[in-house]
Image: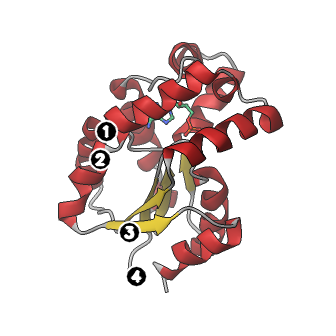
């Protein structure tokens, strides 16, 4: 238990966004979703949005330097002092390393990396379902879905090996109803 400095981690389609919305209520901390931040910029066609779109539309990660600068700026704001929920960041080992540096500079540390685990087949099914419901461009095309899964495996999953020796990873079974999964996550903080 103790701290509320949290990373929510897991493959695309693991239910991170849904669980994040519930968890920020429980913990009363700001929700920092890099995916939401990029979508905001894409919608408003800012320079950052145009850059982000050229990667996210293909299921690729936005380059680390761009993403890290955006998160650094957000974590420098005062409302994170009592805790924060990072959703979708870090997604590469360089991002995880950069996060450590940023938190060090702010005199903060990470308490929990909540790893929502689901199988590849389950991910594929969930992402194509989400494409028809939400109309998210990056969920619509099977090739893009495959690319997002591959990107997760190659670039994001290695973050777990980075964090495991630090003793902060909490493995959560992501199969079940939204409430069942949330109960497992909530237990981390009880
Ligand atoms: P999400 O909603 O978290 O699945 O993010 C949607 C898209 O935004 C991803 O497929 C990436 O293109 C981009 N994105 C979100 N978070 C990151 C990150 N930490 N690093 C790089 N790209 C990201």
Q: How far apart are marks 4 and 3 (CA)?
A: 11 Å
Q: Distance between the residues labelled 4 and 2?
A: 22 Å
Q: Does the residue labelled 1 lie within 8 Å of ligand 1?
A: yes
Q: Distance between the residues labelled 1 and 3?
A: 19 Å
Neighbor class of circle 4 (other Cα within 10 Å; few <14, some 14-19, many 20+) is few
- Vertical placement of 69 versus 2: above or below? above
Q: Are marks 2 and 3 in contact (CB under 8 Å)?
A: no
Earlier-in-chain disc, 2 versus 3:
2
Earlier-in-chain disc, 4 versus 3:
4
Q: Which residue is drawn at 57% across and 37% down?
A: 35
Residue denoted by label 1: 95
- Dot 2 lies on which element? helix
How far across and how far down the image is residue 188, in percent? 46, 78
- Dot 4 lies on which element? loop
Residue denoted by label 3: 170
Q: How far apart are marks 2 and 3 (CA)?
A: 13 Å
Which marked residue is nearer to the observer: mark 1 or mark 3?
3
Residue denoted by label 4: 1
Residue denoted by label 2: 159
Neighbor class of circle 2 (other Cα within 10 Å; few <14, some 14-19, many 20+) is many
- Dot 3 lies on which element? strand
Q: Residue at x 57, y 73 (%)?
A: 27
Q: Are marks 1 and 2 in contact (CB under 8 Å)?
A: yes
Is residue 104 visible in the rendered image? The answer is: no
Q: Is mark 3 within 8 Å of ligand 1?
A: no
- Vertical placement of 145 versus 103: above or below? above
How far across and how far down the image is residue 162, in percent? 22, 51
Q: Which of 143 and 92 is in front in this view?
A: 143
- Vertical placement of 86 versus 150: above or below? below
């Amino acid at each position: 238990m103790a701290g509320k400095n949290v990373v929510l981690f897991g493959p695309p389609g693991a239910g991170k966004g849904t669980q994040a919305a519930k968890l920020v209520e429980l913990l009363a901390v700001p929700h920092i979703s890099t995916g939401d931040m990029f979508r905001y910029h894409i919608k408003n066609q800012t320079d950052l949005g145009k850059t982000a779109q050229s990667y996210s539309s293909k299921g690729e990660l936005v380059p680390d330097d761009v993403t890290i600068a955006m998160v650094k700026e957000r974590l420098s704001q005062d409302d994170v002092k009592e805790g924060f929920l990072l959703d979708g960041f870090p997604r590469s080992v360089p991002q995880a390393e950069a996060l450590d540096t940023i938190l060090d500079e702010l005199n903060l540390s990470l308490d929990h990396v909540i790893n929502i685990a689901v199988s590849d087949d389950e991910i594929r099914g969930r992402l194509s379902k989400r494409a028809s419901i939400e109309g998210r461009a990056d969920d619509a095309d099977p090739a893009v879905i495959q690319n997002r899964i591959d990107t997760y495996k190659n670039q994001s999953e290695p973050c777990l090996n980075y964090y495991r020796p630090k003793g902060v990873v909490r493995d959560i079974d992501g199969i079940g109803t939204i409430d069942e999964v949330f109960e497992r996550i909530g237990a981390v903080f009880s």
